Image (cartoon, grey):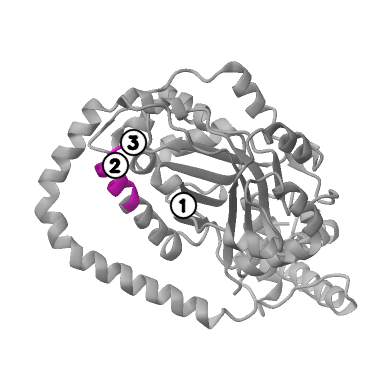
Amino acid sequence: MTPQSQFTVVAPVTRGREDALRELLATMTSQPGVADPDNLLVPFGNCQRLHFARLVILEDPTLADTEAYGLPAAQLPVYLALLGDCDGRSRECLADLSRRAGDGLSGIFANCEDFKEPLLDWMLAHDRPPAVSYVNWVGRTVLQIGEESALQRALSQRVSRTPVASSAEAQQRWHDLALYVRREVSAGRLALTPDPATPLAWRLAKCANAVLVLSGTLIALPFLILFLPLLLLWLRRHEKTDPEICPPPDPRALLELQQLEDYDVTNQYTALGSVKPGPFRSWLLTAVLAAIQFTCRHVFTRGHLARVQTIHFARWLVLDDGARVMFASNYDGGHQPYMDDFINKVAWGLNLVFSNGIGWPRTAWLLKQGARREHLFKYYQRRHQIPTQVWYKAYPGLTLIDLARNHRIREGIERAGMSDSEVAAWLQLL
């Protein structure tokens, strides 16, 4: 199995260069916000291990919200971020990008304050580890997705569409299709690359992380229980006094966001906001993100994040020494169904994280209300969403449902035998 990783290269944009940078990034797109995979600056399509990528200018429209706490409007940088989700080590993917698109990336990052050559060293120095990294299906590679998609197309064109008269006929169809695939693979017209061995270092690091985190949790648990009443009172005091800032989003900003959506069955989402001031929220956010990261690494690795099954990759990134947090995801379907999915299935999870952000709809005991107040939540998330200038997907037109179906088709082809009911179910996949 080849595990996945993420890179997030972040650097402050030189003051006054924002508009020029937007114009440069626009030359990389074939549709608003959607990367041409063969664009001249950074041809993402040549990077065979890259699932998703984006270039986004992190310009926060909500910095003045700190004034609700009697603080001056925060003076924080505008950043340029290069995000990628890739197979194998992120360092190797960045090295591949720098080899294939060094001049283009240098031209883009030249708009950042401290850019200097060599490009790869600079990108690695500015690659910030996310606080949380989510991968829908750990081990599913770009190569595998492409091969299984080609297999599905080939079999769909070949399979008979006449009704199956008997179980024996169904078994014969499966046998004939399996024989056809073996011949196509031998001829080089189809490929089904075997899954490589899982890197030992990755296995050891994952086991070590589980042991350390669980051991630390057990050590801290008695103290947490002892101080829990005080923490709950502290939480409730904040909940009752923290201001809500959930006005309807600016119509022009909303239109700009909507014009970047629905060019594919998958969409991108990038949001940025400030953390509520004070140590309580800082500590709570740190603890919650650590817990989510643990579950994403050890529990939610096979097709779902809690009950949400439409996210390919996601990450949370802490910026400005904890003052702000960025969230980015790649998800199937439209924006409204995506938000409704969260509200209906994991509103409590949204509250755990995002209620630590300035202006979040008021919660009750952390888990209640908040995101359940639907119109306020939807205003809030749109107001904090920022336009993504360049977004790349390696397998346009394919949803997570498609990827799972195609893998089941491959599993059926590679099996030595199946029962009558299994064959009937497998043929329905085609």
User: For the residues marked 1 and 3, what is the alpha-carbon distance in whole angstroms?
Assistant: 26 Å
The three-letter amino acid code for the residue at tag 1 is Leu
Q: Is tag 2's residue or tag 3's residue first in the polypeptide sequence?
A: 3
Q: For this view, does 105 lie left or right of residue 69?
A: right
The percent position of residue 216, horizontal first and vertical second, equals 25, 68
Query: Mark 2 = which residue?
Result: 281
Secondary structure character of the magenta stretch overall: helix
Q: Quadrant of the C terminus?
A: bottom right
- Using the image as rendered, state which of residue 306 and residue 171 is in the foreground: 306
At 38% from the left and 38% from the top, the residue drawn is 275
Residue that label 3 marks: 276
Q: Position of residue 392 (x, y in %)?
A: 72, 48
Magenta stretch?
Answer: 276-286
> Which mark is in front, 1 or 3?
3
Q: Which amino acid lies under the numbered mark 2 shown in the image of this protein?
A: Arg
Q: Are marks 2 and 3 in contact (CB under 8 Å)?
A: yes
Q: Is residue 62 above or below residue 313?
A: above
**For residue 284: magenta?**
yes
The circle on residue 305 is: 1
Comes first in the chain, label 2 or label 1: 2
At 47% from the left edge and 27% from the top edge, which residue is drawn?
Answer: 378
Q: Residue at x 41, y 41 (%)?
A: 345
Q: Earlier in the sequence, mark 1 or mark 3?
A: 3
Residue 397 visible to the viewer: no
Q: Is residue 289 above or below residue 252?
A: below
Looking at the rendered image, the quarter that the N terminus falls into is bottom right
Q: Is residue 64 above or below residue 117?
A: above
